[in-house]
Image: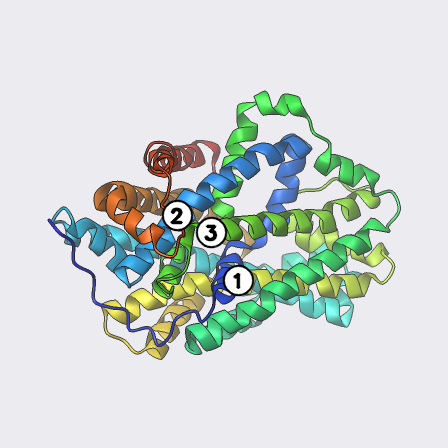
Amino acid sequence: MATTKASPSAAPNNFTSHFGFILACIGSAVGMGNIWMFPYRMGEYGGGAFLVPYILFTILFSIVGLSAEFAIGRLAQTGTLGAYEYCWRRINHSRIGYLLGWIPLLGSLGIAIGYAVIVGWVVWAFANALTGTLLTSDAATAFAQMTQPFGSLPWHAIVIIIAAAILISGVTDGIEKINKIFMPAFFVLFAFLAVWVAFLPDTAAGYAFMFTPHWEDLLKTNTWIMAMGQAFFSLSITGSGMIVYGTYLRKEENIPRASIWTGLFDTLSAILAALAIIPAVFSFGIKPDCGPTLMFITLPHIFARMPLGQLFAVFFFLSVIFAGITSLINMFEAVSESWQHRFHLRRNTAVLLCTGLALFVGIFIEDAAQAGTWMDFVTIIIVPFGAVFGAVSFYYILGYKELRQELELGCSKPLPALFGIIARYLYVPLTVLIFILGIVYGGL
């Protein structure tokens, strides 16, 4: 059966430039996983050798994974729910596509709820770095008090309000403009911090931890599994978030090239974060750890002992806020856009409903343990399932033939035949494998 497009998106505007679109995508992909998870995994799974599978998987997932999400959004001209309806209409089951499309959409909302809580913690750290309190008090005690039930409400609320204000401003005046500011600032600040750290004493062990290749680790299954998981989730392939950015994409945009640029800068951001954190940690004789312990307890102790440590702390947490906010607005936009057009809501109403719900639910998981449990469930079960559903819907239900036509718009040459083979017979099975391994490993 020939497919017909979903009703056109009523988005008030599109991305006005290739540069603005790329920065928005990078902003979505670059998040706190790049900052606190990548350096630790790089050191634990082969140092410089870890980069080999990580880069290979990043290239693969960028080209055939991100590209598919961008393309289906632009093809259907609507976000998550409408995009899956469009795919499944091809086999006369648009209702099934719509219903199952709620799973990746709720995955985006679920991540946003927990992520907003964590970004609130970062805002708390930034505020206390500005006053110097973060460096003069017991960081462990202060963090424990702040992450008790209802302990971070003001900071949490600030994050939600900022995200809502950006989204209400629209795509051009909100999302695009803020990413044009935040993303360059993120890279400049982290590059500055990385150079600053290089002049600290005894940083050689940190660089060795990161970049000494343990080539024997390439023979270990876990190195490849963890590199695959890090690359996949770092790129925000959720079956939802990047679809909505594709909706606002002009037809002349070269989607595969934009996807490669997104993967490249996402990888660069992770390496920059590692260069700013790991050598500093080793300079003071502390073994790096992952998660909140490193960012909110270990690093403040290090900042307190560094020359101009307060200034370093301010720049560091400001950079993390930039990464967190730009990722968060993509999650909220995916949900708001779908609600706006599914239920015929005004944009302001859809945004306020989405962010208000996120704040209401998030209040009850401000406790660190509850936030961790929430994020584990969403990232281990819901989001990977959404990614699998998306991959199957795009490359099998809709079919590669129709998707290819959209992917080739804006390209100077047709896609090679190998693209479809890799997408259907390597990428799609890998998304299934990631879903299964995430459950087995308790998260990737």
In depth, the one of 52 and 275 nearer the eye is 52
Q: Is residue 420 above or below residue 166?
A: above
Three-letter residue code for mark 3:
Arg
Q: Which residue is mark 1?
A: 23
Label 3 and label 1: CA atoms lie apart by: 13 Å
Q: Decide if residue 361 is in sight here.
A: no
Q: Is residue 303 above or below residue 294?
A: below
Tell me where residue 267 appears, x and y as whole percent.
59, 47
Label 3 and label 2: CA atoms lie apart by: 12 Å
Q: Which residue is mark 2?
A: 413
Element class at badge 1: helix
Please state which of the two labelled residues, at mark 3 or mark 2, is closer to the viewer: 2
Q: Earlier in the sequence, mark 3 or mark 1?
A: 1
Tell me where residue 156 appears, x and y as whole percent.
54, 68
Element class at badge 2: loop
Q: Say which mark, if any, is on residue 243.
A: none
Quick check: 294 left or right of 400? right
> Is mark 2 in CB contact (under 8 Å) with mark 1?
no
